[in-house]
Structures are given as C-alpha cells and as structure tokens.
Image: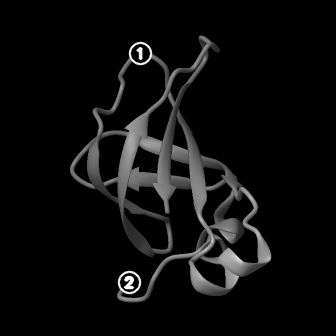
Amino acid sequence: MAEDLNPEHFTPHIGKAFRVEGGTHALILVRVEQPGLDARAEAEYRQPFTLIFSGPPGDVLPEGARVLTLDDDTSFSLYVIPIHTPARDRQDYQSVFN
C-alpha cells in the first residue's frame, strides 16, 4: 500500500488471521488501540494507533519487518514486535504507528 495506513485499514479485519510471509506463523488481529490526541494535534498529525495480534504460544516470531497477508491476498508491510504476554495459551504482538 502506497498511502499512509490508518486504523480504518485494519478495523474490518479484527478477528481475522494474517499469514506471515515466508514463515509458518498466523497472527490474529485482536484489536486496534487508538490513544486520543488533543484537537490541535489531531489537525496536524496522523492519529497514532497500535495493532495487537495474538499467535500461538511457544514459537515466538522474532521482532522485525514482516509482510502479513489476509486470506483475500490483501497484504501489509508491518514492523511486528512480540510483547509480554502473561497468558500461557498465546503470544501477543504489536505493531505501532506514530
């Protein structure tokens, strides 16, 4: 995608699996977090947001730039970071947009 990504690109895909190109991982988009900005900042800057994904436990996908693809072949180039996940049944990841 050539345009700047925003939360609206991802919210329709909450609950869907994203395949990691070149790997065996599939990550489920769990939520899109959007911290608020004050009105002045909103006029000047892109709304920051964070994608939270969940994957299987144990086989942690290392931090790095990844191409994630949906079943309809829509793909996104994202920097994915594993995050602390207290639950033992999954491993969570984030991709942050400032």
| Dot placed on the residue nearer the N-terminal end, 2 or 1 | 2
- Residue for point 48% across, 29% down: 83
Q: In the visual, does 63 lie left or right of 7?
A: left
Colour scheme of the picture: one colour
Q: Amino acid at mark 2?
A: Met
User: Which element is circle 2 on?
Assistant: loop
- Residue for point 49% across, 53% down: 96
- Could you say which quadrant of the image residue 81 lies in? top left
Image coordinates of residue 33 in percent, x first then y, are 69, 53
Mark 2 nearby-residue class (10 Å; few <14, some 14–19, many ≥20): few
> How much space separates mark 2 and mark 1, taking CA atoms?
31 Å
Depth order, front residue of 27/10: 10
Q: Is residue 92 above or below residue 51?
A: above
Q: In the visual, does 75 lie left or right of 85?
A: left
Image coordinates of residue 16 in percent, x first then y, are 62, 56
Q: Which residue is mark 1?
A: 58
Camera-near label (2 vs 1) is: 2
Q: Which residue is mark 2?
A: 1
Q: Quadrant of the N terminus?
A: bottom left
User: Which element is circle 1 on?
Assistant: loop
Q: Amino acid at mark 1?
A: Gly
In the rendered structure, find residue 89 and report the number of the disc placed on it.
none
Image coordinates of residue 23 in percent, x first then y, are 26, 43
Image coordinates of residue 54 in percent, x first then y, are 57, 37
- Residue for point 45% across, 82% down: 4
Depth order, front residue of 69/4: 4
Mark 1 nearby-residue class (10 Å; few <14, some 14–19, many ≥20): few
- Residue for point 28% across, 32% down: 62
Q: Is residue 33 above or below residue 5?
A: above
